[in-house]
Image (spheres, grey):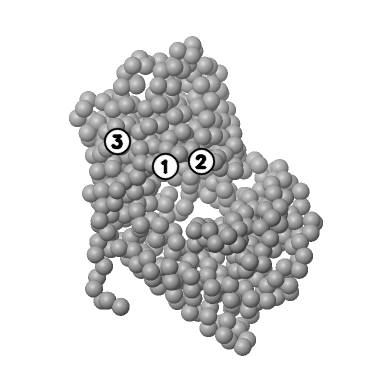
Amino acid sequence: MSSAAPSPTPARRLPLAGVLRVGRPSDIWFKPALSVVVAVGVPNLTLLTLGRLDLAMYTMAGSLCALYAHNLPYAARARALAWVVLGMLASVAVALVTASLTSSAVVLVAVGALLAAAQKALCDATGIGPPGPVIFAFISSASLFTPQTLGQVPGHLALAAAAGIWAWLVGMAPRLVRPHGPERRATARALNAAAAYAETSATASPGHERARAAGAAAVHAAWQSLLATGGRSEPRRALERLVVRAEIALAAPADTDPGRLRSWARDLRGTGPAPSVDLASAADELLGVEAERVAGRRPLADRLGPLLPLALRTALGCALAGYVSLALGVGRPYWALVTAASLYQANITLTWSRGVQRVVGNLVGVLLFAAVAPLAHLGPAALVLCCLAFNFGAEALISRNYWLGSICVTPMALLITEFTGFQRPGELMTDRIVDTVVGALVGFVAAVAVTNRRAGDRVENALETVERACEHAARLIAAERPGPGALEAARRQLAAALVELRATVDAAAGEWWQRAVPEERVLLAERTGHRTLATAVRRQGLHVLEGTRA
């Protein structure tokens, strides 16, 4: 093997084909859509009744927290939503205090850019998304440019906190009807992904490797969902056995009936008992505390380190976008700042795609605002109802493609600025178009300027982790009597390492000006790792005895 350092990856051709392709909606698109309508509607209608719709921006800060954590089990959701609300309050507090101390647009843009960078890093490190940092940046940036006095800040924060508590209650309410809904959905996704892999294996499809990686990721996500629930009730045990069945399908696709896996997945959609799958006694170890042992996460500081280039991109891009907007005389530079903040994805290629989607969606959204403005201007009640309709539409469409959601987000953002009084539509539309173009162009230039040299290092580290985990699992497979739970713990560690490797490689593949991804070594590590997982399953004696309805 040559010892020469790999040459940097050059700038790739930026994609256009498929960027605006409309996909299938999320299987839970209606949950955030309905939640945000209830979370935003009650405070806004209350303020409308009191004749204080001018305070709606502060309640929106708390209400929009209802968009988060819909994929998490309720025990984990309660904690995550609480942290989202606290993070939102902290962001708004910094913004309002800054706005009360200075009216300098230069200072306000700088603070907004720093807040956006911190929000991006923390959201990515904690995995809280979608919608990720964009909502935080939107609210905090708007708050920065809202005139304040220091004495008003506590009252405005109290409104945001009250709406945040209401959003927390809205987010937790479905637990009363379907207490295991998130875990059931995660398990169903794992079964469907395993079935898809079994089908590609049988037909020797060119997407075989990708289907296997998707299946491994879905199974890993299902275990993370189950391990986040706390306690091991009988409903959770039933779901665990189904996830084990998905793992067995990944290990032995030729012996798998994809139709049965999909049937079990369909049965999990309702509220009835989960399908019963009897496993060999050797699987009991799989369902024990050893699975819990490997569920820990790295410290937050370790997760933040690799995200520094993305945070720098965000800070630079948002600041420059805001300053260019100011130089052009636009009255709302925070729109350019938020546009830049919304672009930054895991790599430059994805950032470019998001930029195209944002521009197209915003421009169409401005036209939609022009059509709706006469209706919204009929009165405050019409304004509130239009905003609620766009809230619903944004969440209903955004999972199909980001640009579709932006079509509704844009008029909603424009209408929110009118809570303090109706404004001239032409001026609002012009400002929005200019800020969208400025934010997208300047934001992307910043992404290109701030290279992510750490992407290659992360691939190397992920490869080493997989190779070590594979060697450790192989030693236990060869051992005559591995310790209780040792093989299962090693197998789960290897599975998690393979998922992390694939995610890291996909992110690095879209970056410019870095070391080329060692594709042959990655492919070898993945194939060896998955073969080792399959051997471990056979070594543990896992097999399905029968699948019947509980």
Q: Earlier in the sequence, mark 2 or mark 3?
A: 2
Quadrant placement of the N terminus: bottom left
User: Residue drawn 29% across and 36% down?
Assistant: 439
Which residue is tagged 3? 439
| Residue 91 seen in render | no
- Is there CB contact under 8 Å for labels 2 and 3? no
| Quadrant in which residue 156 is drawn | top left
* Rendered location of residue 265, percent (x, y): 68, 52
Classify mark 1: residues with Cα within 10 Å, few (<14), some (14-19) or many (20+).
few
Q: Which of marks 1 and 3 is in front?
A: 1
Please name which of the two marks, 2 or 1, marks the residue nearer to the observer: 1
Q: Which amino acid does label 3 sit on?
A: Gly
The residue that label 2 is drawn on is: 23
State how far apart marks 2 and 1 are (Cα): 10 Å
Q: Residue at x 34, y 53 (%)?
A: 510
Task: Assign a secondary structure to mark 3.
Answer: helix
Q: Position of residue 437 (x, y in %)?
A: 29, 32
Looking at this view, name the residue that lies furthest to the left. Answer: 327
Q: Nearer the viewer, residue 345 or 85?
A: 345
Q: Where is residue 210 in the image (x, y as percent from the top left)?
A: 49, 58
Name the residue beneath numbered marker 1. 18
Count neighbours of disc 3 (C-alpha within 10 A) and say few if under 14, some if 14 to 19, many if 20 or more. Answer: many
